[in-house]
Image: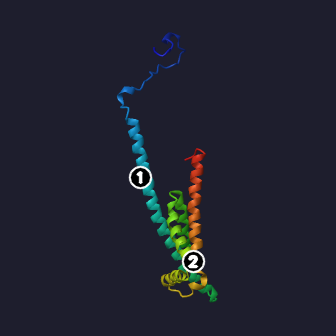
Amino acid sequence: MTDGDPTPASRPAGDFDVPSYQVDQTSTSAAWPAETATTGAAGRQRSRGRSAVISALLGLVLVGLGLYLIVEFGARIVDATSGGRNASIPDIVLEVIGAVCLLVGVLLDGWSPWATALPGLVLTGFGVWSLVSIDAANRVTDFANTVFSRADLVLWGVPAWVLVIGVLLLGASGAVTIARSAGRTRGRS
């Protein structure tokens, strides 16, 4: 036996003879681990970039669809309830679907913080622009009136709501980024 193993005669009964295998270090080239590390880092970088683009596009679609459904069918619900009628079930269901789309967009931040960063940047940009310029506020409100076929959205303070929703989406993206970096500094991945 090798490595200081006792001889078979001095071994206790029930001990099994397990051969020890040694890795041959001469069969691998010296450059192999460095090449693997470089390839692995490039693959991870490409994967992160791909997930950022996909989640940004999915987030943009989910947030846009969610906001559209909430405003369009929420306005119908407001009209119905202010007129003394009950809101229709399809309007309520479609507004809830819009809220779920927004929720899924925010939950998508768990995959990549870009899911709400891009919609947040767009909405915040339009919101700030519309608050500092009267012409911009008119353009944003006219766009909302055209999309939703309503003339009373100007009374709802559309430019301010655009800014608030944009800042909230940016805040969600920032919170995920901070949580991820805190997890890395504490040894979690």
Given residues 166 and 102, the one toward you in this image is 166
Q: Position of residue 188 (x, y in %)?
A: 57, 46
Q: Earlier in the sequence, mark 1 or mark 2?
A: 1
Amino acid type of the residue tagged 1 in the rendering: Arg
Q: Position of residue 1 (x, y in %)?
A: 45, 14
1 or 2: mark nearer the eye: 2
Q: What is the crowding at mark 2: few (fewer than 14 residues within 10 Å), some, or many (at least 20)? A: few
The label shown at residue 132 is 2
How is the model colour-coded? rainbow
Given residues 136 and 66, the one toward you in this image is 136
In percent of the image, x 38 and y 39: which residue is there?
35
Check the image and report above or below for 12 versus 186: above
Amino acid type of the residue tagged 2 in the rendering: Val
Given residues 23 and 166, the one toward you in this image is 166
Given residues 16 and 76, the one toward you in this image is 76
Q: CA distance from mark 1 to mark 2?
A: 39 Å
